[in-house]
Every structure is written in structure tokens, then in C-alpha cells.
Amino acid sequence: MKAQDMMTRNVIGIAADATTSQAFDLMKRKCISGLPVLGLHGELMGIVTRNDLIRNGRTRPRPGVTELMQCVPGLNALASWLGIGAARSVQDIMTRDPITVTEQTRLGNIVALLNHHRIKRVPVMHGNRIVGIVSRGDVIRALAHVLGSAQSQETLDADLETRVRAQLAQMIEGTAPPVQVSVHRGEVELCGTVQSDRVHDAIRLAVANTNGVGAIRDRLVSEESVRTPHGPERSAGAS
């Protein structure tokens, strides 16, 4: 099996000049933990992950700060060091020259790359254009397919369900959340009612960041009616 047989083709990317806040919002909204960073013509410039955002902090502009920094020499650098300046751009914190594969890269080689470099995903390239992403979840499903055993898939699903439940329990300090979890062929279905959009987003992000999750069928209902506005995103095919 090759990368083209298992990759996710609908790649969600973000522009290099987008802010870290916009990257965080996009990851939260799409329930993913990493984004390819794309140039003006859709070329791959790097990868930004949830861990990159956490390590570097996520700052938002504060009233009057931008104008003040423009007037006082050296204040921009100081404000950035203190974490109180305008939001940084994605290209400031992204991983440049990321590990990539081609459409013809075999499953065994992809597994070796993920394990050796301790990464969760690799972009699939056709020339300098990104045409897909292979994640650990994609690899697990491919391995299950190669094994050709329904029992193996059931075992994988049961293990994934256990880990998702553990992730949610840890998120709320060991208390079982009011969420029903079921897994079928790597797809996690969530059912139940939560008290706020913030809790809803946190649950989706926790599930998305669990290794092996291929997709999420979200049937959760939030008691709040106001949703977070969408942030900007860029299609991998933009030109």
C-alpha cells in the first residue's frame, strides 16, 4: 500500500502570514492538531502544530499596544519577549522543511518516518504541491486493512474507544463526562449534551488529538446557541 492509497486528500492549510491565534482557532474548529503552512501559490512552506502554539504562546493584540510599539524604539522586541505584543504570525513558529513523502511512498517507509522523527503526520507531495496528508490514524487504518481481519479492526476500535474515554476523563480531572463514545473503523461518534460551546470545543479537540482517530461524528448538543466566528483558512489548492 502506498501514500496515495491512504492519504487524506482534503487538506486544510493556513496562510504563512496568518496569526497564531487564527491557527489555534482553525485547529479547534476543524478538530485537528496540525496544519500545513502554505504560500501564496499553495506551495508548502512548513508545518505548524498545536504543540508549536503552546510552546510559543498565543497572544492577541491589546488596545493601544500596537500604536505604542511603533512610537517607542525597542519596545516591540521587549513586548514580544514579555508576550504582550501583537499576535505573531504562523511563519514565525512553524517547522520549516518538514518531512514529506510522495504519492508512491510505501506504507512501511511512512511508518518508519513517523516513528523515527516522532511526528504525527507527513504531507504528501506532487512536485512542490501538497496533495494530501498521511496521519497516524490513516496508517492505523491502512495496517488494519493490510491485515485483512475484521477481528483486528474490532480490536483497534475497542482500544481506541478506551483511549478516547481515558482522554476525556483526564481532561475533566477524572470525572466521567456526560458524553457517549462509540468507535467504528476508526470513526469516533460522540453523543450527549454539554453545558457550553467551550466544553464542546475542548471535547472535540481532545478526541481529535487521540492517536488513531480517523474521523469524528459529532452529535453533541451545546446548551449555548452562539458559535465562535470562523477564522481565515486557505485551501491547499489555492493559487
Image (cartoon, grey):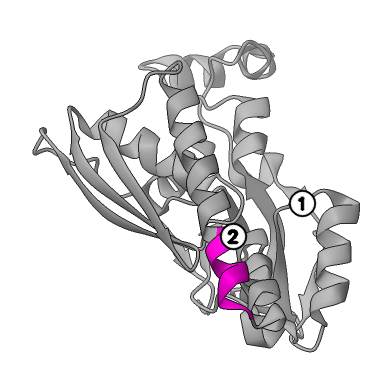
Which residue does the image show at 53% across and 38% down from the upper left? 20
Question: What residue did someone put label 2 on?
Answer: 156
Q: What secondary structure is marked by label 1?
A: loop
Residue 183 magenta-highlighted: no
The image quarter containing residue 215 is bottom left
Name the image quarter holding the N terminus. Answer: bottom right
Q: What secondary structure is marked by label 2?
A: helix
Label 2: how many residues lie within 10 Å, few (<14), some (14-19) or many (20+)? many
Camera sees residue 76? yes
Q: Above or below — where is 159 with respect to 127? A: above
Image location (x, y in percent) of residue 210? 56, 45
Residue 76 placement, left or right of 45 = left
Which residue does the image show at 46% across and 44% down from the upper left? 207
Image location (x, y in percent) of residue 174? 45, 18
Label 1: how many residues lie within 10 Å, few (<14), some (14-19) or many (20+)? few
Which of 26 and 38 lies nearest the eye of the viewer? 26
Tell which circle, 1 or 2, labels the residue nearer the N-terminal end.
1
Cα distance in 3D space between marks 1 and 2: 20 Å
Q: Residue furthest front?
A: 151
Image location (x, y in percent) of residue 10? 48, 75
Which of 157 and 211 lies nearest the eye of the viewer? 157
Which residue does the image show at 61% across and 62% down from the upper left? 137
Camera sees residue 40? no
The magenta stretch is: 149-156
Mark 1 residue type: Ile
Residue 48 placement, left or right of 99 = left
Image location (x, y in percent) of residue 81? 68, 15
In the rendered structure, find residue 119 and report the number of the disc placed on it. Answer: 1
Chief SS of the magenta region: helix
Mark 2 residue type: Leu
The image quarter containing residue 142 is bottom right
Q: Above or below — where is 101 with respect to 1? A: above
